Image (cartoon, rainbow, N blue to C red):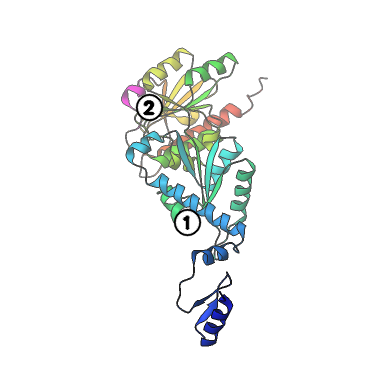
C-alpha cells in the first residue's frame, strides 16, 4: 500500500493538507480528537492549572450561593467576613480562617498594594485563597461592601459572662461592662463594638432575642473590634443585671429625661453601662435596676441621639476617668 503516492496525488489537486499524524485530509474534513489533544498539550501547564483553579473557585462560590434554606441552616458553623479591615484584623488576631475569595486581577484594574499584601499574608498562613470575578464577590457579599476580598471563618462563639466576671474579680480587677439592650441595626451594633474596644470595655452583653446577631454586616461595621472584645448573650438581662449588683457593680443607664449629667458620675470601680435600643431606649423593667439614669445635655431642637453615638459619648468619659491618674492627696 502506497500512502504517499495517494497523498501526493491529492496534494497536486490542491484539496488536501497534512495532519499531525503523517496522512493528509481533504479540505472541509473535520480534524480528529487527537489533533485537538495534540494542540492542547502545547498549552503551558501553569496556564491550564490556573484556569482550572479559577473555574473550581467559581463553582464553589456558586454552590455556596445556591444552597437551599435547609442547607443554609446547617451551614451556620461558619460565616463570611467582608472587607479588608475585618479580614486583616481576623488574621492578625489568629482567628481560624477556612478559606478566602479575592478579586481576580484584570488588565484594566489590576490589584492595589494592600490587597496584594493581604493575599500574601493569607497564603503564608496556609489559608486557601481562590481568585474570583467581581460579580461572584458581589453575590456572596449581598449588601455588604467586600472591597475585593471575602473570608470564611468559623462561627463566632459567645463568651461565658459568668466565668469571665468571676475570673476578673478573683484577680482583683474592676471590670467595665457594656450592656446593649435590643439594638436592631447592624451598623449601630458594629459601631458600638468598635467604641467598646477603643475605650477598653472588658465585656459587651447582648440580649439573646431582641438584638441583631454578630453577622458579617456587623463585623464589617465593627472594623475588627470583634477579634478583641468578648461578647456574651443573656436570656434575661434583668436577671443578669441583678447578679451584677450582688457582686458590687454600679449600674448606669442612659435616658433623655434623666436628671443626672453623665459627666458628674464616677465610673471607676466595677461598672456596667446600659445603652437602650434606637427607638424605645432601655426596657422599662431594666430601667428599674439602674442605680443612676444619665442624661447627655443637648442644645438643639432634637432630644435624642443615635444609640452608637450616645454609647461613644458616655464610654469615652468613663474611659477617661478609669485611665486617668487619681488625684494626689495633699
Mark 2 = which residue?
A: 208
Q: Quadrant of residue 113?
A: bottom right
Residue 173 at x, y percent in the picture: 58, 19
**Left or right: 151 with respect to 123?**
left
Total numbered labels placed on residues in the image: 2
Decide which of 278, 166 is in the foreground and name it.
Answer: 166
Give residue 163's position: percent from left, percent from top: 51, 17
Quick check: is 283 in the magenta stretch? yes
Residue lying at 47% horizontally and 56% vertically, measured from the top left: 134
Q: Give the mark nearer the N terminus: 2 vs 1.
A: 1
Q: Residues within 10 Å of mark 1 (few under 14, many from 20)?
A: some
Image position, residue 321 (x, y; %) = 57, 28
Please tell me whether residue 330 is drawn above or below residue 69 in the rendered image: above
Q: Which residues are magenta?
A: 281-289
The residue furthest front is: 1
Is residue 305 within the magenta segment?
Answer: no
Amino acid at each position: 500500500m502506497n500512502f504517499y503516492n495517494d497523498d501526493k496525488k491529492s496534494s497536486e489537486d490542491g484539496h488536501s493538507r497534512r495532519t499531525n499524524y503523517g496522512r493528509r485530509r481533504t479540505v472541509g474534513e473535520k480534524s480528529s480528537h487527537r489533533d485537538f489533544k495534540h494542540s492542547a498539550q502545547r498549552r503551558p501547564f501553569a496556564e491550564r492549572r490556573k484556569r482550572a483553579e479559577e473555574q473550581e473557585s467559581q463553582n464553589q462560590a456558586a454552590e455556596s450561593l445556591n444552597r437551599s434554606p435547609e442547607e443554609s441552616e446547617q451551614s451556620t458553623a461558619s460565616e463570611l467576613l467582608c472587607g479588608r479591615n475585618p479580614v486583616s484584623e481576623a488574621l492578625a488576631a489568629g482567628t481560624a480562617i477556612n478559606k478566602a475569595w479575592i478579586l481576580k486581577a484584570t488588565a484594566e484594574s489590576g490589584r492595589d498594594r494592600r490587597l496584594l499584601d493581604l493575599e500574601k499574608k493569607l497564603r503564608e498562613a496556609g489559608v486557601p485563597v481562590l481568585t474570583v470575578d467581581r460579580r461572584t464577590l458581589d453575590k456572596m457579599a449581598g449588601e455588604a461592601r467586600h472591597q475585593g476580598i471575602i473570608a470564611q471563618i468559623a462561627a463566632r462563639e459567645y463568651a461565658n459572662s459568668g466565668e469571665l466576671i468571676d475570673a476578673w474579680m478573683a484577680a482583683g480587677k474592676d471590670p467595665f461592662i457594656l450592656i446593649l439592650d435590643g439594638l436592631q441595626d447592624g451598623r449601630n451594633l458594629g459601631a458600638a463594638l468598635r467604641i467598646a474596644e477603643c475605650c477598653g470595655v472588658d465585656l459587651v452583653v447582648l440580649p439573646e432575642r431582641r438584638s441583631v446577631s454578630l453577622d458579617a454586616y456587623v463585623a464589617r461595621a465593627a472594623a475588627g473590634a470583634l477579634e478583641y472584645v468578648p461578647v456574651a448573650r443573656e436570656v434575661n438581662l434583668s436577671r443578669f443585671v441583678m447578679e451584677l449588683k450582688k457582686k458590687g457593680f454600679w449600674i448606669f443607664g442612659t435616658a433623655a429625661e434623666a436628671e443626672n449629667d453623665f459627666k458628674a458620675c464616677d465610673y471607676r470601680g466595677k461598672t456596667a453601662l446600659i445603652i437602650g435600643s434606637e427607638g424605645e431606649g432601655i426596657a422599662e423593667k431594666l430601667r428599674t435596676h439602674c442605680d443612676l439614669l444619665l442624661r447627655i445635655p443637648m442644645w438643639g431642637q432634637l432630644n435624642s441621639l443615635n444609640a452608637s453615638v450616645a454609647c461613644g459619648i458616655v464610654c469615652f468619659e468613663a474611659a477617661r476617668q478609669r485611665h486617668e491618674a487619681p488625684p494626689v492627696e495633699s
